[in-house]
Image (cartoon, rainbow, N blue to C red):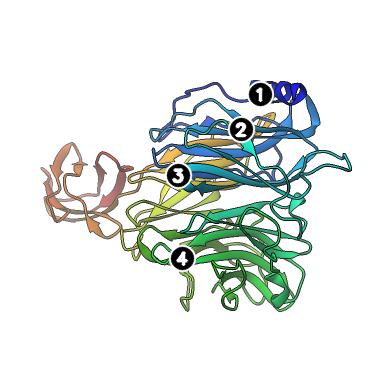
């Protein structure tokens, strides 16, 4: 007990100080600086609006050991103090949060605590905490004992009755476990697609029925691509055949993203969505698929690689899709937000990486009503760590000139935006309820740059003339 407490205390010394400011335009480092490129955080937003970030990292007192920790981020983006969950394990894999009954928190993780032959934690483990995020209590014994979860990144979702589902992929297959004790059967979903191999599962649930789905990348012979499969909530077993995501393979070939497959439902709304890059060997597209639909929507298309695609659902039903793209040699983050019906997407917003960032490895996101929290794993000089920022949605700005008049329309994912402030050549106007306004200029000819700003949005600019 003494040794574990000391390890936890030392681990906290390697983490950022408490209450660091955040918000749009500011990157704040969340995890220690000695990460590796396969690390991926897990996110859970509790009922108080706080976003909790969980991760595993090297124990600073003994780099051969692993620690598990979490830290809160306020709705305004301020990072709080890190809290230890477990410390000094022989090995750990990327963890996954799930909501617990009564507003509490639960985390699942693969790992082996020690090499003692009598060790009780040797495969898939779980710990729980109240909504406040501390203290954490480890459940004694494995949650599941099959499928080599001890070395596999996991994903999790909570069913309507409070029962957790956990999924992971390993060289043995793609598995789903129901509940908190061994014995649910842990069916292998990859077996129906030709055995080896499945990668990086994600779990999501329909926002009305609560029906769970698992998504993963399959490399099975003749079955490459992203697949989604409905899960029986009563057993954790498959409820239907796996469905291939349209566009996730090109000419029979594809590439795994090597990150948790992004999948989500929408609160109070039917449907489950998966986002993924498309194209081979260069991933030229960013795709969004409503599971079961005959096609995927293309949200971005470029000549270069679109990577690190992720997905988040806001409380009002809007979807955010985010990805990275090396623009001008810098790994920028791009984002688009949908309307409330998730049928139309707004303007693409782009933000620069943290100072000195050289490479990006993973993106994760959690959406609020008017902003999306973004977690990115970056290599910076002498460091590899996960950073946090926030992004506001973009404005779609349309403008045309007719003599002295510049006619402008401002939209948010197809919906008119009232009260947007417009500027052009030193003259201004404000949009009406229909999102339209006219700016009158002193001259009749020439191109002019129009800008639009409104609180809660990223500003937009367009040329008219």
Residue 464 visible from this viewpoint: yes
Displayed quadrant of residue 221:
bottom right
Q: 386 or 133: which is nearer to us?
A: 133
Instruction: Residue at 78% x, 41% y: name it.
Output: 91
**What separation in Å lies between label 2 and label 4 (alpha carbons)?**
30 Å
- Residue 149 vs 452, above or below: the answer is below
Q: What element carries label 2?
A: loop
Q: Residue 31 carries which label?
A: 2
Instruction: Please give the residue where the numbered disc 3 appears in the rendered image.
Output: 102
Instruction: Residue at 40% x, 42% y: name it.
Output: 47
**What separation in Å lies between label 3 and label 4 (alpha carbons)?**
25 Å
* Crowding near the residue tagged with mark 4, few <14, some 14–19, many ≥20 C-alpha atoms within 10 Å: many
Looking at the image, tell me whether mark 2 or mark 4 is earlier in sequence order. Answer: 2
- Residue 51 vs 145, above or below: the answer is above
Q: 15 or 33: which is nearer to us?
A: 15
Q: Residue 272 carries which label?
A: 4
Residue 251 appears left or right of 80: right
Q: Is mark 1 on a helix, strand or loop?
A: loop
Mark 3 vs mark 4: give the one in front: 3
Residue 328 visible from this viewpoint: no
Instruction: Residue at 48% x, 33% y: name it.
Output: 132
Image quarter where the N terminus lies is top right
Instruction: Please give the residue where the numbered disc 1 appears in the rendered image.
Output: 14
Instruction: Residue at 38% x, 65% y: name it.
Output: 208
Q: 143 or 169: which is nearer to us?
A: 143
Q: Is mark 3 on a helix, strand or loop?
A: helix
Q: Where is residue 148 in the image (x, y as percent from the top left)?
A: 78, 56
């Amino acid at each position: 007990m003494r040794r574990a407490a000391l390890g936890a205390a030392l681990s906290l010394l390697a983490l950022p100080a408490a209450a660091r400011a955040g918000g749009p335009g500011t990157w704040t480092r969340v995890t220690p600086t000695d990460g590796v490129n396969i690390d991926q955080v897990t996110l859970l937003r509790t009922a108080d609006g706080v976003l909790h970030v969980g991760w595993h990292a090297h124990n600073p007192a003994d780099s051969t050991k692993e620690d598990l920790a979490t830290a809160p981020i306020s709705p305004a983006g301020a990072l709080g103090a890190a809290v230890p969950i477990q410390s000094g394990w022989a090995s750990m894999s990327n963890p996954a949060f799930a909501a617990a009954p009564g507003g509490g928190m639960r985390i699942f993780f693969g790992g082996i605590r020690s090499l003692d032959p009598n060790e009780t934690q040797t495969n898939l483990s779980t710990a729980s905490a109240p909504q406040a995020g501390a203290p954490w209590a480890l459940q004694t014994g494995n949650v599941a004992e099959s499928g080599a979860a001890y070395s596999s990144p996991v994903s999790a979702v909570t069913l309507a009755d409070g029962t957790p589902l956990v999924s992971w992929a390993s060289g043995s297959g793609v598995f789903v476990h129901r509940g908190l004790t061994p014995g649910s059967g842990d069916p292998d979903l990859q077996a129906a697609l030709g055995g080896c191999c499945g990668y990086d599962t994600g779990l999501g649930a329909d926002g009305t029925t609560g029906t769970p789905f698992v998504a993963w990348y399959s490399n099975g012979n003749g079955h490459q691509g992203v697949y989604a499969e409905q899960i029986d909530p009563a057993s954790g077993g498959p409820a239907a055949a796996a469905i291939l995501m349209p566009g996730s393979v090109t000419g029979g070939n594809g590439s795994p993203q090597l990150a948790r497959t992004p999948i989500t439902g929408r609160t109070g709304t039917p449907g489950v969505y998966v986002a993924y890059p498309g194209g081979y060997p260069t991933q030229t597209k960013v795709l969004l698929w409503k599971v079961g639909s005959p096609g995927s929507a293309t949200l971005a298309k470029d000549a270069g690689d679109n990577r690190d695609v992720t997905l988040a659902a806001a409380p009002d039903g809007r979807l955010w899709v985010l990805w990275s793209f090396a623009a001008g040699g810098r790994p920028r983050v791009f984002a688009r937000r949908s309307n409330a019906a998730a049928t139309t997407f707004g303007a693409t917003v782009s933000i620069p990486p943290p100072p000195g960032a050289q490479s990006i490895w993973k993106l994760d996101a959690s959406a609020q009503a008017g902003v999306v929290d973004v977690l990115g794993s970056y290599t910076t000089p002498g460091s590899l760590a996960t950073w946090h920022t926030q992004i506001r949605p973009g404005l779609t700005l349309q403008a045309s000139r007719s003599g002295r008049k510049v006619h402008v329309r401002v939209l948010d994912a197809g919906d008119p935006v009232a009260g947007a402030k417009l500027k052009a050549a030193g003259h201004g106007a404000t949009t009406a309820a229909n999102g339209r306004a006219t700016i009158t200029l002193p001259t009749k000819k020439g191109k002019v740059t129009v800008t639009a700003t409104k609180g809660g949005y990223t500003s937009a600019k367009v040329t008219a003339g």
